[in-house]
Amino acid sequence: MLDEDRCWQALCERDAAFDGRFVFAVRSTGIFCRPSCPARRPARERVAFFADGEAARAAGFRPCRRCSPMGPSPSEQLDALVVAACRLLDEATAPMTLPQLAARIGLSPTHLARAFKARTGLTPHAWATARRRERLDAQLPEAGSVLDAALAVGYSGTRAPYAEARALTPAQRRRKGAGETLRYALAPIRENYDYILIDCPPSLNMLTINALVAADGVIIPMQCEYYALEGLSDLVNSIQRIAQLLNPKLQIEGLLRTMYDPRISLTNDVTAQLKEHFGDKLYDAVIPRNVRLAEAPSFGMPALVYDKQSRGAIAYLALAGELVRRQRAAAKTATA
């Protein structure tokens, strides 16, 4: 038994959730419709409710041509057309323009674009591009070359795949990041963060090399001692070599003076040499000798959580601010 008050409310709200649960007929026109019909709302006294279209037909009413209460709803019809458009884009051997796709589907380009984005969250072009990337990634490990994989999924050559902004090039993805384990692992998530910091041990082992291959820049912490200066030259040479052979984007971001004590003359001498050789690469912020910094790791806590008022924690905050300011200044210079 239909609740006519609830049916009337659904009719007034054009609630598509009630499509298929009942139809309403208008006595003055002899037409019955689904609840979501966009036609003008009739007066309440002229409306009759039926459990389905067959009951309305048996009572002498005919179906509305606008909302098709006996067949799929307009929304369902658009769903089917968008699915058909996705299938056409998948099967196309060459990129299709929006007007070409719309002509095949039987909708106007504007209507198709609106319906497609409402259901997939992407434009047809963006959806086709993303699907082609997926097929390329699936082909790369098995293909004889990057060119073979690109041609197999519809690219005209290798220029377009390499031009796409991806963390790894097609050749690197084909090798599954061989020799670049950390870079390959970070590739899917690096766009989610402004900064990713990789803390390396104080030695040039495989972990450090993987980190340098994955990184865009290096922050070198060093104590103001002469032995540290000697090690610094070896590290700079290693960074330059990795940049030449494995990671052309790698550069020294800056040098950070740690365990800094301005009362010691050696500290000032080393600082003068660093400024002479590295200039602006030397951070103004320094990390002082601080007991609270040394205690924090033994409690398993970051220094900023352990004691955010300590001189060491404040120094690291100053470093973070300087790093961000330098990055923003570099970005403005690059776009100017």
Image (cartoon, helix red, strand yellow):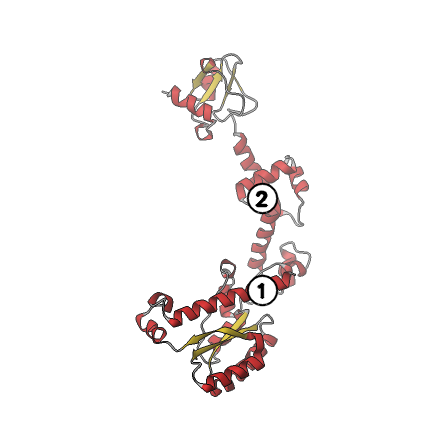
Where disc 1 sits, the SS reads: helix
Q: Is residue 22 left or right of residue 115?
A: left
Give residue 245's position: percent from left, percent from top: 60, 76
- Crowding around mark 2 (Cα neighbors within 10 Å: few <14, some 14 to 19, many 20+) is some
Q: Evaluate if marks 1 and 2 touch, with contact meaning CB atoms under 8 Å apart.
A: no
Q: Residue 74: where, in percent of width, then height?
A: 54, 30
Quadrant showing the C terminus? bottom right
- The residue under the point 47% across, 13% down is 46
Disc number placed over residue 329 in the picture, else none: 1
SS assignment at label 2: helix
Residue in view at x 39 percent, y 78 percent: 289
Which amino acid, by three-letter code, is at mark 1?
Ala
Going from N to C along the chain, the mark reached first, 1 or 2, is: 2
Is 172 drawn above or below residue 59 in the view shown? below
Q: CA distance from mark 1 to mark 2?
A: 44 Å
User: Could you tell me the amino acid type at mark 2?
Assistant: Cys
**Residue farthest to the left?**
299
Residue 65 can be seen in this image = yes
Q: Which numbered disc, 1 or 2, marks the residue closer to the eye?
A: 1
Q: Which residue position holds label 2?
A: 86
Tell me the residue at 53%/68% (across/down): 177
Measuring from the top left, give residue 209's x and y in whole percent: 51, 76
**Going 41% across and 68% down the picture, which residue do you hit?**
314
